[in-house]
């Protein structure tokens, strides 16, 4: 495992996400993920499983100092009168006095971005978040958020998988010293059956999923979130640091990007994307 450094944050390059996981699944899988070596866990208020994650980590006897925990503020909690209280509620559920990374989950122009960023900074100043960042922001909004923030933003968490070219946002993030955290790496399962990715995997003795996670973390400044509810897949997803993709293979995966490759773009939440 290696860490990505961004504005003083040292973030494990491979995280375990619990999006769309039930409480029972979180409580079953998280101890196995810990045993395998995962220390970076990613949740969100809207996932409604922060309490399950906190309980699972506590039951497994995980040492808080060994963990890197990310959660995200839901858009309904952006108003100043709700923001801090929602963070306290998240911390209660997680059974922690701080998170390592706190993100704004989606853009929401009903609350001025300056106010959202000010609330984020206040939480950090109060010691309830070691680092702060954003999620699902295109380059224009990311630049605005960076300019508005007193404390440095350390990541922009976005959909990033082989069929979606994220060059614009990745280059802008790098230029500003931010990392890029990639979610939906498996493109809703499409990469697992992709013949081109399978062929690359066969050359390394790795699965298509391992190849894509490796492709992500092999890019400068990129953190990958893996996710599985299948106990057998956990160790597979973690075993991506014992091989290196060739430049040709990296380029071949980049070449799979297509104009309609974006999967996550919910109406009413999605901003105007870079592509």
Image (spheres, rainbow, N blue to C red):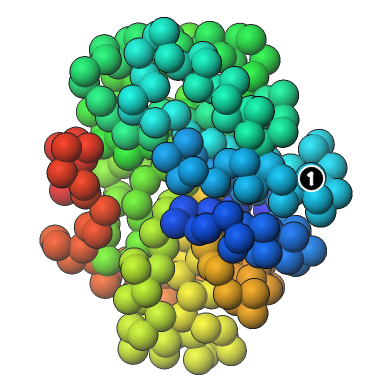
- The answer to whether 154 appears left or right of 159 in the picture is right
Q: Residue furthest front?
A: 24
* Residue 94 occupies quadrant: top right
In what element is the residue under mark 1?
helix
Name the image quarter holding residue 146. top left
x and y percent of residue 56 in the render? 72, 51
Nearest to the observer: residue 65 or residue 92: 92
Q: Quadrant of the N terminus?
A: bottom right
Image: 73 above or below 44? above
Give the residue displayed 47% in from the left and 36% down from the top: 45
Dot 1 corresponds to which residue? 58
What crowding class fits label 1: few (fewer than 14 Cα within 10 Å), some (14-19), or many (20 or more)?
Answer: some
Compared with 243, 182 (above or below) is above
Q: Identify the residue at horizontal 79%, vertical 45% (top origin).
A: 58
- Residue 219 visible, this angle: no
- The picture places residue 16, in percent across and down from the top left corner, at 59, 56
Residue closer to the observer: 130 or 13: 130
- Against 1, residue 84 (above or below) is above
Count of numbered tags: 1
Q: Can you tell which quarter of the image residue 255 is in? A: bottom left
Which residue lies at the image location 81% right of the left edge and 50% below the top edge? 59
**Image position of 35 with respect to 206: above or below:** above
One can see residue 35 in this view:
yes
Residue 274 position, x and y percent, is: 19, 42
Residue 46 relative to residue 240: left or right: left
The residue under the point 37% across, 74% down is 189
Q: Position of residue 79 (x, y in %)?
A: 35, 13
């Amino acid at each position: 495992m290696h860490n990505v450094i961004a504005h003083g944050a040292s973030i494990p390059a491979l995280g375990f996400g619990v999006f769309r996981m039930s409480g029972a699944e979180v409580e079953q899988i998280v101890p196995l993920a810990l045993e395998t070596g995962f220390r970076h866990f990613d949740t969100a208020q809207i996932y409604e499983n922060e309490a399950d994650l906190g309980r699972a980590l506590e039951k497994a006897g995980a040492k808080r100092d060994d963990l890197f925990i990310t959660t995200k503020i839901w858009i309904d909690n952006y108003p100043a009168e709700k923001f801090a209280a929602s963070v306290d509620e998240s911390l209660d559920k997680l059974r922690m006095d701080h998170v390592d990374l706190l993100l704004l989950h989606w853009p929401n122009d009903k609350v001025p971005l300056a106010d959202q960023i000010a609330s984020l900074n206040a939480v950090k100043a109060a010691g309830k978040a070691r680092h702060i960042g954003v999620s699902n922001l295109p380059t224009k909004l990311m630049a605005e958020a960076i300019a508005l923030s007193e404390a440095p933003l350390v990541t922009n968490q976005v959909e990033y998988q082989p069929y979606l070219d994220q060059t614009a946002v990745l280059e802008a993030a790098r230029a500003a010293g931010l990392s890029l955290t990639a979610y939906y790496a498996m493109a809703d399962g499409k990469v697992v059956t992709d013949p081109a990715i399978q062929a690359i995997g066969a050359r390394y003795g790795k699965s298509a999923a391992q190849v894509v996670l490796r492709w992500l973390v092999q890019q400068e400044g990129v953190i990958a979130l893996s996710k599985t509810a299948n106990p057998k897949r956990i160790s597979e997803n973690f075993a991506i640091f014992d091989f290196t993709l060739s430049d040709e293979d990296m380029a071949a995966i980049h070449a799979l990007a297509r104009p309609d490759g974006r999967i996550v773009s919910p109406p009413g939440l999605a901003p105007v994307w870079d592509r």
